[in-house]
Image (cartoon, rainbow, N blue to C red):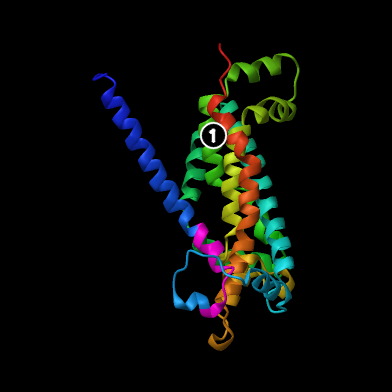
C-alpha cells in the first residue's frame, strides 16, 4: 500500500489541477452567458451568478438593430473563415508534400525562405497589400480576406513537421511504382493520413480568420460586407447614452457559437491523431 501511495497522491493532484484549469476556462464563458441574459442596468451593478430575464430581449435588439446587421455579418465571417481554412490546409499541405517528397537543389533555400516569411508581421506588408488589391478593384470585396490564406507559412510548417513523423515515403514510392500520379497520390494517400493535422490547422485557421479585425477593417467599408469583429467593435464604440452592454454580450455570444460547432465537428479527428499509427516498414 505504501508503494502505491505516491502514485495515488499524484493522481489526486492531477485531478485537482484539471478541475481548477477547467473552472478557469469555463468560468468566463459562464459569465458571458449570464451577462447576455441581463439588462444593461443590471450588468452595471456588478457580478451575478444568476441568469437574468433579458435574454430574448437582447437577442431581439441585436437582430433588429439596423446598424449591426448580425445575419450578414455571420454569413460574411463564415464565408471568409471557411474559405481561409480550406485554402490554407489544402495548399499548405500540398506545398509541404512537395518539399517533403521531392529532393531537389533549391529545396533548403525555399524552406528557409518560407520560414522567414512566417516571422514577418502582417502589418509590415499591409500597405502594399492594400495598394495591390486597390489596383485590382477588390476593395469592398471578401476575396482579399481569404485568398492570401492559400500561402500560409505557419500551416505549411506544421504540415511539414507532421509529415516527417507520420508519412512514410515507402507509401509514396509504392504508389509511384503502381503508376499513380502525384496529385492522385496526394489526394488519395497523403490527405487521409494527414486528417488529424488538417483538422487541427483547420480549427486554428478558422478561429484566426473569424477573429481577424485588422485586415477587414482596412478592406471593407460597406455595411453588408462587414464581418463580426467589425460589427462588435462598432457596437462597442457606440455613443455612451445609447450603449447597451446586454447587446454587446449577446453579439459576442452569437459570434462564438460557430467556433464551438466547428471545434465539436472536427474534434474527433484530433482525438484520432492520438491513435493514428504509422505504417511499419
In the image, residue 212 lies in the stretch drawn in magenta? no
Residue displayed at 72% across by 30% down: 187
Residue 110 or residue 244, whichever sits in front: 244
The part of the chain drawn in magenta is: 29-41
- The residue identified by callout 1 is 160
Q: Is residue 115 above or below residue 11?
A: below
Image coordinates of residue 239 in percent, x first then y, are 56, 86
Q: Is residue 106 above or below residue 205?
A: above
Q: Is residue 76 above or below residue 112?
A: below
Q: Is residue 79 above or below residue 223?
A: above
Image coordinates of residue 210 in percent, x first then y, are 61, 58
Residue displayed at 75% across by 24% down: 181
Dot 1: what SS?
Answer: helix
Residue 99, image quadrant = top right
Quarter of the picture containing the N terminus is top left
Residue displayed at 52% across by 45% down: 154
Residue 63 or residue 184, whichever sits in front: 63
Residue 260 or residue 5, whichever sits in front: 5
Image coordinates of residue 178 in percent, x first then y, are 74, 14
| 78 sits left or right of 105 in the view | right
Amino acid at each position: 500500500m505504501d508503494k502505491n501511495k505516491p502514485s495515488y497522491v499524484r493522481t489526486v493532484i492531477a485531478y485537482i489541477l484539471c478541475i481548477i484549469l477547467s473552472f478557469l476556462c469555463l468560468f468566463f464563458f459562464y459569465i458571458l452567458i449570464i451577462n447576455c441574459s441581463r439588462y444593461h442596468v443590471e450588468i452595471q451593478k456588478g457580478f451575478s451568478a444568476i441568469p437574468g430575464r433579458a435574454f430574448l430581449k437582447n437577442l431581439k435588439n441585436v437582430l433588429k438593430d439596423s446598424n449591426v446587421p448580425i445575419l450578414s455579418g455571420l454569413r460574411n465571417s463564415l464565408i471568409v473563415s471557411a474559405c481561409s481554412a480550406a485554402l490554407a490546409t489544402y495548399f499548405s499541405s500540398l506545398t509541404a508534400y512537395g518539399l517533403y517528397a521531392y529532393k531537389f537543389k533549391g529545396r533548403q533555400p525555399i524552406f528557409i525562405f518560407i520560414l522567414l516569411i512566417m516571422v514577418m508581421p502582417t502589418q509590415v506588408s499591409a500597405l502594399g497589400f492594400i495598394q495591390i488589391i486597390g489596383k485590382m478593384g477588390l476593395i469592398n470585396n471578401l476575396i482579399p480576406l481569404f485568398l492570401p490564406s492559400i500561402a500560409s507559412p505557419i500551416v505549411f510548417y506544421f504540415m511539414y513537421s507532421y509529415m516527417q513523423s507520420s508519412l512514410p515515403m515507402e507509401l509514396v514510392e509504392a504508389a509511384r511504382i503502381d503508376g499513380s500520379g502525384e496529385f492522385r497520390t496526394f489526394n488519395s494517400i497523403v490527405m487521409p493520413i494527414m486528417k488529424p493535422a488538417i483538422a487541427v490547422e483547420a480549427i486554428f485557421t478558422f478561429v484566426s480568420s473569424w477573429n481577424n479585425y485588422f485586415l477587414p477593417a482596412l478592406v471593407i467599408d460597406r455595411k453588408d460586407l462587414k464581418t463580426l469583429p467589425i460589427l462588435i467593435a462598432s457596437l462597442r464604440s457606440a455613443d455612451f447614452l445609447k450603449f447597451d452592454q446586454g447587446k454587446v454580450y449577446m453579439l459576442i455570444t452569437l459570434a462564438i457559437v460557430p467556433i464551438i460547432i466547428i471545434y465539436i465537428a472536427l474534434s474527433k479527428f484530433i482525438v484520432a491523431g492520438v491513435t493514428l499509427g504509422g505504417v511499419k516498414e
